[in-house]
Amino acid sequence: MRDVEFDEWVGTVPVQLRNDPLWNSAYYRLAMFLFDKVWQDCELLRKDFRGREIAQQLVRSAGSIGSNLEEAYGRGVGSADYVRILRIALGEARETHGWYLRARHLIPDQLLDLRLDIIKQITSILSSTIASHRSKLNKS
């Protein structure tokens, strides 16, 4: 299976998802992209009994990034609950990073680097978004 780039992947995303207001958030688009990559990577991981265990954890943690972003958005952007749930999504992103590092024996180095780069982008955007919203909440 060929590893597609982000811009090419966007063209494969159902229009219903691209029309959702949450799609405008870069961290959400990246989280959804990452989950599709996890889906692909599970094909590699499932070939080894150890990889099957890691695949389960990757699906859970990477899936939780996007689902927590969806929940946070539903609670109201900028609210204290929004920030709290973004922090949970950030934790899930860091956990996903850890599971990818544990999978390094079964995933080619080039793919691993690409996945870790996506996670780094997600954690960076989420960290700055959380800090920005926290400072706004502290001023009120």
Image (spheres, rainbow, N blue to C red):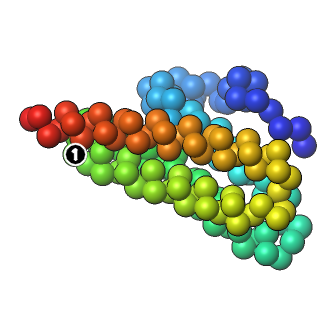
Residue extending farthest to the bottom is 49
Residue 122 in sight from this viewpoint:
yes
Please say if 110 is above or below 102: above
Could you tell me which quadrant the N terminus lies in?
A: top right
Amino acid type for the residue under numbered disc 1: Ala
Residue occupying the point 65% across, 63% down:
99
Q: Is residue 121 left or right of residue 47?
A: left
Residue occupying the point 53% across, 52% down:
93
Residue extending farthest to the left is 140
Q: Is residue 91 left or right of residue 36?
A: left
Closer to the camera in the image, 5 or 110: 110
Please say if 69 is above or below 95: above
**Would you identify the image quadrant in which residue 13 lies?**
top right
Residue occupying the point 63% across, 40% down:
118
Dot 1 crowding, Cα within 10 Å, few <14, some 14–19, many 20+: some
**Image coordinates for residue 123, horizontal then vertical, percent:** 50, 44
**Image coordinates for residue 41, horizontal then vertical, percent:** 79, 53
Residue occupying the point 72% across, 73% down:
53
**Image coordinates for residue 67, horizontal then vertical, percent:** 49, 49
**Would you identify the image quadrant in which residue 44 lies?**
bottom right
Q: Which residue is mark 1?
A: 80
Could you tell me which quadrant the C terminus lies in?
A: top left
Of helix, strand and loop, which one carries label 1? Answer: helix
Closer to the camera in the image, 51 or 108: 108
Residue 28 in sight from this viewpoint:
no
**Image coordinates for residue 113, horizontal then vertical, percent:** 74, 45
